[in-house]
Image (cartoon, grey):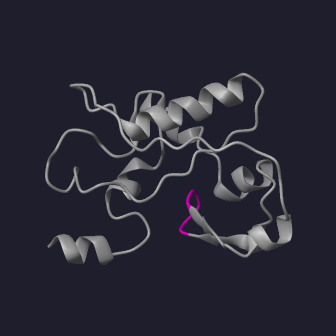
Amino acid sequence: MLQRVFEAMIPIFDVAERAGIPADFLEPYGKYMAKIDLRLRETLGERKGHLILVTATNPTRAGEGKTTNSIGLSMALNKMGHSAVVTLREPSLGPVFGVKGGAAGGGRSQVLPSERINLIFTADFPAVSAA
């Protein structure tokens, strides 16, 4: 089953295209991750939209918390026909210190490739400061 999940991963440039983000505004970190250049806001102008912030939750015993809920919410909105994108900051230090929760979601509500996300995402600064 895990192999099928990885085979179904969509390259980040395809994801960005679906979301209306031109490739010129992406800073790729491999095939499946990227940061979006803030200059994109200048080209878009004012748009009417909604923002949902998930800032706190009581995680379950299995470690399902803010990340899993945020991903699940985005998936549900897309399933309902809305255009929704989930944006996650770098994960907490929970995985570094062996606390429950993988910081990448779980089950069908997860961000892939989770091993890259749990291993310091796009920079080494958090690893250096945590050491």
User: Which quarter of the figure is the C terminus placed in?
Assistant: bottom left
With 106 as the anchor, is 126 left or right in this view?
A: left
The one of 129 and 15 positioned closer to us in this rendering: 129
Q: Residue at x 60, y 69 (%)?
A: 28
With 50 as the anchor, is 129 left or right in this view?
A: left
The location of residue 35, given as percent across then percent down, is 58, 67
The location of residue 114, given as percent across then percent down, is 40, 48
Q: Main secondary structure of the magenta part?
A: loop
Was residue 32 drawn as part of the magenta stretch in this picture? yes
The location of residue 77, given as percent across then percent down, is 67, 28
With 71 as the anchor, is 106 left or right in this view?
A: left
Range of residues picked out in magenta = 29-33
Q: Residue at x 73, y 72 (%)?
A: 25
Q: Residue at x 33, y 75 (%)?
A: 124
Q: Is residue 44 above or below residue 68?
A: below
Q: Residue furthest top?
A: 80
Was residue 48 drawn as part of the magenta stretch in this picture? no
Q: Is residue 23 above or below residue 95?
A: below
